[in-house]
Amino acid sequence: MPRFPRAALVLALSTSLVAAGPALAKAKEAKPAPVADLVKAVDIPYQSFTLDNGLRVIVHEDRKAPVVAVSVWYRVGSKHEPAGKTGFAHLFEHLMFNGSENAPGDFFEPLQQVGATDSNGTTSFDRTNYFETVPTGALDRALFLESDRMGHLLGAVTQEKLDNQRGVVQNEKRQGDNNPYGLLRYEIFENLFPKGHPYHHSTIGSMADLNSASLADVKKWFTDNYGPNNAVLVLAGDVDVATAKAKVQEWFGDIARGPEVKAPPASVPTLPAPLAKEVKDLVPTTRIYRMWAIPGLNDAEAVPLQMAAAVLGGLSSSRLDNAMVRKDPVAVSVGAGAQTFEDAGILIVQADVKPGVDPKVVGDKLDAEIAKFLATGPTADELQRAAASYLGGTISGLESVGGFGGKAVTLAEGALYSNDPAYYKVELDRLAKATPEQTAAVARKWMSRPAFSLTYTPGERTEGGENRGGAVTAGKVSAVAPDRYWNPELGDVGPDTGMGTAVADRSQLPAVADLKALDFPAIERAKLRNGIEVVFARRATVPTVQVAVSLDAGYAADPRSALGTQSLMLSLMDEGTTSRDSIAFAEAKERLGAQIDGSATADETVFSLFALKPNLSASLGLLADYIRNPAFDARELDRVRAQQLNRLKAELNNPNAIASRVLMPVLYGADHPYGIPPSGLGTTAAVTAATRDQLAAFHSAWIRPDNARIFVVGDTTLKEVTKQLDAAFGNWKAPASAKGTKHFETPVPTPKPRILLFDRPKSPQSVIMAGKVLTVKGSDEIEPLRAANDIFGGNFLSRFNMNLRETKGWSYGVRSRISNDSDRLTWVAIAPVQADRTGDSIREFQSDTQAYLGNEGTTKEELERTVNGSVRELPGSFETSGDVLGGIRQIVKFQRPDDYYEKLPATYEAMTTAEIDAAARKALSTGDLVYVVVGDAAVVKPQLDGLGLPVEIATPAN
């Protein structure tokens, strides 16, 4: 089950806030659905069986879409790595995608051919997993591929593949280390967990250990850990247990059982005394952390700790937000969250110091607020809001069968870590029964222990990440008995001696059976009494409704002299309405389990609502109040201004964001609506100068009913929701002031090919961006051009990525993309590469592009893969309500027919190599590209000087 959302955000170490985060509006008090009722709505029925070789199989039937999620979880992660072998689990995960004995090519190739979605693999402390969602008719192919790499891998693992993936992983490490706070992962685990503890070292490992990995080492890792008896296979979707049993036996039944894998002992450590450390990094402001190690996910106190962290700093209305950001704004942002692993976890509290405030004052106040919370504990109302907010996201997650967080993940996690696929029910029961007294006692027990206090201050790093991430000491540890992989008390069937050992035919890829075409939901329309159009589709899989109020505004609507206006307006809208302040506003939303937020793209401003069906009417009232009646409290403006300036400062330290801020104004010109920093955060001067009246005037010009359209997808009817929307929005009247306009007639400047270099000292990687403005617009029929981009650089199997990642090993991944805007589009290539290969990477990009646009155009194989993948992935692409909502918005935005997606397969199937090549040669080129390079100039500039292009020192738009 997904943990509390903000806990994941803390661990992800986000360096900035979204332009407009969760926002709430006052409405009439409504009694929300009881938490106990919401818990009952969370149910994932399953059946299970176990093969003779120990492979545990869990099957969940969900017939809403013709797809099956295949998820294979191995009980081996970085905690199983001995000293000197750090990073092996993750390195081996990469090797598993490089082909097996009977499928020797790249693993993604046959999956893209069948239209797989959500294909990936991940490594954590406790496990390694591999997953893909495939059309039902391609299930045999997916099972063939997964079983072949489980049972028939070693003959395909070569020194060349090892060396290549070693380079890829090392560039993945550099890419993570290169970002602000990129070394935080090392600080957390090296300090909270002692030397020798399985969680002490990072999953990514150290450069030295990665360099030392030999072919014999990685082969032994496979034979020791990748047996079927050390794995769980989940099939979730359009499949029943009888079908699953026959197919799994056919493909996995002949794989021999492996050794029993023994997990290292892992206690929950307590620091002997408070520990404090200060580090410097390219960060916008001082950040203060307080951290503790806590129990793992099977401990009965894990859920109460997560609840406590949510009340302290996870909710929009959290104690820390109210005390340190709203009432006494000494911090620009705060957060708290608990992240649990199998054997232990971490609880992190953090505060970003408001510029001009003494960090010691903020640290003292943070400690005081933690102490006050531990003394008083949460209220019953706070716990209800935390539970309802969590359950809303949990119920939403039930709509997806696979991927990173769908039902297959929930069942696999329970089986692997808790020997109970339905362990999520245990956690939800603990959540529903949590009391203020219990939660307070648990929080005091764990958070009164000595803390690790880490302070990040702005400045140049004194060390990099090259030598971080490894285990510091060797030393033998005694092993513990492994878990059993079946549990008769839970209805599982143990090793089934009634099944023989079949030997599957692996001489060729299994044929793809009949595939069902996409059945896109019918689109219905209505109008509110004030003329707002409602666009609706019914999806009743889960009892939720999603709403998007879309306005023709977006960042392109920002005045040229006041960039960042819209982001600041959206942030200020979060701070309450004319009838309810920001705290009461947040509390109302949380009680309903609703999510309400405002966001923007280049073209649109969107106010979104996720609501539980029983609470829809009240949630719509909050949404309407939020949109229609913002308080625009002048007293709150300085606070949200400081937050946006902090986010802007963070952006100016992030290499990808720097490159975008340099490139877009150069390509479009500063006067064009798209010639702005694409994040929408604007410039320091404009944000500093913005006034309350300016933001209110922008709202009047753009956020109005004559500029709006409402999209709804979910478990309701058009008639019912139109009535509810009329009650919330029907009397909304446009102001007398003129509606805003955007000036796309502004000419785009003639491109001036050159390299714009931004010096970022000590960067282990360079970020390369190259781009141009195309003549086509978003509403044009450009499917052949998008297919050409897919082939050249748009996905994992593209020529550009396969060259720089899989052949050269210079990057963790490179891509090219065509934008998705209403007016003229851009083609941009993005390549984060190791610093000493910056010039070579640009040469390779130019060479690859010239070859593709010259006499090495699209091959028949590339055409087949692109067409097959594009057609066959459509059913899986619209599995959830959110997917359908996005699709409908695209249909309306680009003025396409309602059956656009259902007719798209015919468009793809009619494509030819000649048509794709012609589209590419007409639109793409190398001679008129502008390049931006963000990296260490001392290392990079000598490489750039030999490329035959002028090199200029760049300054990001600010």
Image (cartoon, rainbow, N blue to C red):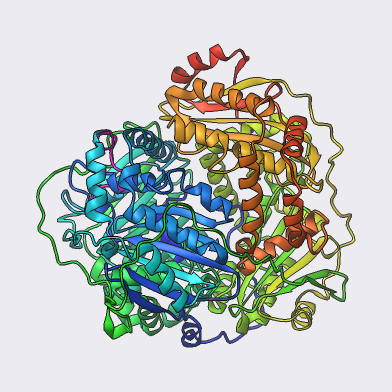
Would you say the magenta stretch is mainly helix, strand or loop? loop
Q: Determine whether 385 is above or below 766 in the image.
A: below
| Quadrant location, the N terminus | bottom left
Measured as percent of width and height from the top left, residue 423 is found at 35, 77
Measured as percent of width and height from the top left, residue 241 is found at 44, 78
For the residue pair 584 and 746, the one nearer the viewer reads as: 746
Q: Determine whether 42 is above or below 554 in the image.
A: below
Tell me if I can see residue 618 in this picture: yes
- Magenta-span inclusion, residue 209: yes
For the residue pair 484 and 243, the one nearer the viewer reads as: 243
x 35%, y 58%: residue = 348
Tell me if I can see residue 337 in this picture: no
Measured as percent of width and height from the top left, residue 558 is found at 74, 45
Q: Where on the picture, by quarter, is residue 235?
A: bottom left
x 60%, y 37%: residue = 793
Q: Where on the picture, by quarter, is residue 743?
A: top right
For the residue pair 884 and 426, the one nearer the viewer reads as: 884
| Quadrant location, the C terminus | top right
Measured as percent of width and height from the top left, residue 179 is found at 44, 39
Magenta stretch, residue numbers: 199-211
Left or right of 540 on screen, residue 314: left
Q: Determine whether 763 is above or below 91 in the image.
A: above
x 33%, y 66%: residue = 253
Q: Where on the picture, by quarter, is residue 45?
A: bottom left
For the residue pair 563 and 7, the one nearer the viewer reads as: 7
Q: Determine whether 808 is above or below 823 in the image.
A: above
Across the whole image, how many numbered discs are drawn on residues?
Answer: 0
- Magenta-span inclusion, residue 275: no
